[in-house]
Amino acid sequence: MGHHQHRGADGPLVPGMPPMLTRVLAVVRDTARLDFTSLHQEGYHVTRCTDPAVAVAELQGLKFHVVMVHIYSDPGGCGAALELLKWAIGQPHLCAYAISEKAVPHGPLDMNDFNNLIKAIKNVASSGTKSPEATLNGPYNTPLSTTASRVKNLPFLERRERRKRTKQVCNIGDQELEHKDGEYVAKEQEKLDQEFKKARVIWTNELHKKFVKAHDKLLAKGDDVPTKILALMKDSTLTRENIASHLQKHRMNLEGEACRYNLRRSHSRTKHHRSTRPASFSSPNMASPQQDPSTIVQSRSPTVYDDRMEIQVQTSNTMDKSSESALVDVPPVEMYPGADDPKQNRVPCVGNSDDNSLRENLSEILNKDPEPSWDDKFLFSGQ
DNA sequence: TTCGAAATAT
DNA sequence: AATATTTCGA
């Protein structure tokens, strides 16, 4: 009973349910004063409550995007509310608004201006930022985000949603159906989150081999794009995105090979390949025994699909010069059409670098190690 | 709608 | 530290 995979389906993940609900918690002294039901039709879910302590518990469950805290002036009356507000402002996952009876310029939102409250909520939903009007005064005026970033922040809430889907599966403690206030709180979210969760693809050797096979075929035609690869692989469990991602990494690997190859060649004239290169330079993995895929588990260590040393370039330093002529230089492999176009050169190595010190550095390092490890590529990729 | 680089998440 | 996912401009 694993989780379902909702792959390929682009529609709503849950029929009849908007892809994203914006949930607001309004903490007000008198809940009856604010009626947000009109918002429900628009996909907002506003929960009211009177007890700041309860509010904190709810908000910690990451079930809300926005919190509105009623700040009132009774002496000693709203200390808890202030604390709540202060806390909420410090929460990266929350947009906090102070609301109050009095309209203070640049102060809390005016509770009596109901439309303005709604506007603020919608503003968060659409941009993920607080509206400027909602900026608070006083010591709690610490905006989480500024309007400057507004434009680029559209995925804000959606990302929060997604994060929630994969994390926080077990905060069941505060999951009660009811508040003290008698306010109903959506409890299904956790279950839904489970449903939404997409399985992470694990690229087993088998899968990778399949990928490489398809990729090689298409590479020959200069058409190694995710869609085509996927089509060739005929694997319904994969998405185009999965392929694109793996392809990105695969290409980097190839560049790593090409880069090392070029480097060593340029440093000393006498580099040679084994005369029998694997069928495809782009698939160092075709040979060698494979682990039983079913036993392969995702590890934190590099995924080595196969024995890469197979294609390692030999160094002349350790070689008998006389054997040189017996070996055939591997002709340059045009891995990527247009790769030598300086405008879009994808090989991030010293080949076209005019930084001589860098070049020497790299050469020196590589020289020390006749058999550079696979990780050498990280010398070039600026990480 | 797809690609692919870059940013993020795990 | 590497792999996988997601975003986002083109």
Image: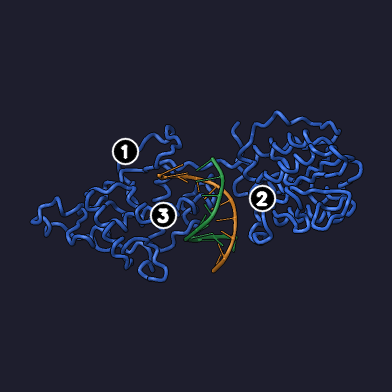
Chain colours: A blue, B green, C orange
Residue A49 visible in image: yes
Expressed as whole percent of the image width and height from the top left, the position of residue A321 reads: 10, 56
Task: Say which mark, if any, is on residue A215.
Answer: 3
Expressed as whole percent of the image width and height from the top left, the position of residue A153 reads: 65, 57
Instruction: Establish if A290 lies above or below A240.
Output: above
Q: Which residue is mark 1?
A: A289
- Say what secondary structure mark 3 lies in: helix
Q: Earlier in the sequence, mark 3 or mark 1?
A: 3
| A93 sits to left or right of A36 | left
The quadrant of the image that shows the N terminus of chain A is top right
Find the distance from the CA under tag 3 to the CA under tag 1: 21 Å
Q: Are discs 1 and 2 both within one chain?
A: yes
| Kind of residue at disc 1 | Pro
- Say what secondary structure mark 1 lies in: loop
Chain hosting mark 1: A
| Residue farthest toward the top in the current orientation of the protein | A173
| Kind of residue at disc 3 | His
Q: Which residue is mark 2?
A: A158
Q: How many labels were placed on the picture?
A: 3
